[in-house]
Amino acid sequence: MKILGIETSCDETAVCIIEATGELSRGNVRFSVLGNALYSQVETHRPYGGVFPNLAKREHAKNLVPMLSVALKQADLLHSLATSSVRFSLTEVEKMLEREQGLFELLKNVLTAHKKPVIDVLAVTAGPGLEPALWVGVNFAKALSLAWDVPIVAVNHMEGHIVISAVKDEHIAPLDFPVLALLISGGHTELVLMKEWFHYEKVGQTRDDAVGEAFDKVARLLGLPYPGGPEISRLAKEAREKNILAPFPLPRAMLQSGDLDFSFSGLKTAVRRELEKLDGGHPMSVNVKMGVAREFEEAVADVFAAKVRDAFEQTGARTFIVGGGVAANDYIKQRLSDMIEKEFPKVEMRVCLAERATDNALMIALAGYLRAQRGNFAKPEDLVANGNLSLV
Ligand code: KG4
Ligand code: ZN
């Protein structure tokens, strides 16, 4: 089955085409990536130090069709002939895209220049995320579905992070349930228990900021560019190599809370207060930045290690999945895998490759495949973007 995945929930405009086979129940789901195109909007949002929803929407509308063209070209599907002929009425497609300025004009060129490609399913992120941004992808999927007469599957972005993180050696090997998933991204920080596939129970979550948001905010305090995660991680690594310590300790919040919840806003506030005390009108030295980055990353890793330990003790889960953009962080991954190996040696840990941890359309296409196999198709007229879409 060929699936075309579309992701526009935040600041990555991504289209991916995969060919997938096999079934979860047989543990033989395999896939190959035929085309994968991603446009990162970081440069657009950098001056604002975070993602600006309406700018994101505009950028998605501008870049979705070019990404579609690249993915189709890589997959060598631009000129492929489908058995049935193109069914679309351009007027209907135009109506579908009336809310996404300029998108129709771009798509029209692609639709009229090429034959219908052989795509079996469209998978699009329906939420959670920035709603104006999500709508662009959703309307785009509806327009393509109409034009190509292909069914749509609405994908939960967080399920996408879970599914891609469950991949091992390019296939989804059987999971030993219950599975505990730590989902850490720019918008989410949660511990989810899965007793079986597609059955989710939230056992812990952040009470304020998401961890990726904390990385981004602390980076800003240190004068580092957006997105802050990779920058902090790079400085922290250098600090460890050079044995540079922070000029002050940072708190490890919620360790005694008795539940599996997190809090990261205090950490950010502590960094701000301490930096103000240090400052005295002087510009921050590189060593201070390195030391703070290190202490911050270690504080986050300490909290995750402690909460994940508690979660395994409480749930008896047998598999550990880590997903979301912050799962690209080598240090956090290492700390978690050291803890699991030492304290829960029977637990299998699965984390995706760093480039698949941050938002991409491969994860949406793959989750879309699993949902399509269950017959979870969306009626285009009922399909909506939902910024707060929940897993449970
Ligand atoms: O999953 P994602 O791409 O988007 C959301 O769904 O939110 O996650 C983005 C977040 C950003 O906050 C970014 O700073 C963080 O992931 N991030 C990292 C690293 N790479 C990306 N955080 C820590 N270390 C990294 N290496
Ligand atoms: Zn994400």
Image (cartoon, rainbow, N blue to C red):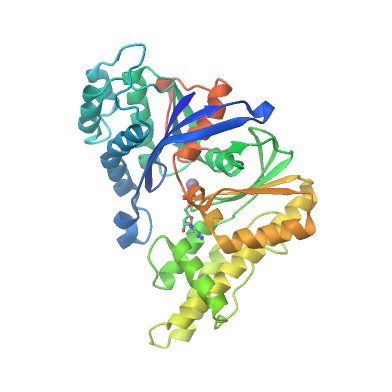
Q: Position of residue 258 (x, y in %)?
A: 74, 58
337 vs 237, left or right, is: right
Outermost residue to the front: 76
Instruction: Please tell me how many numbered marks the rendered image carries.
Output: 0
Residue at 20%, 31% in the rendered image? 105
The quarter of the displayed image where residue 255 is located: bottom right
The quarter of the displayed image where residue 138 is located: top left
Q: Is residue 104 above or below residue 264?
A: above
Q: Position of residue 380 (x, y in %)?
A: 41, 21
Q: Is residue 111 above or below residue 196?
A: above
Front residue of this view, candidates 301 and 82: 82
Residue at 35%, 36% in the rendered image? 74
Q: Is residue 361 visible?
A: yes
The quarter of the displayed image where residue 327 is located: bottom right
Front residue of this view, candidates 245 and 248: 245
Q: Position of residue 280 (x, y in %)?
A: 42, 88
Residue at 60%, 64% in the rendered image? 300
Q: Is residue 173 above or below residue 188?
A: above
Q: Is residue 273 visible?
A: no
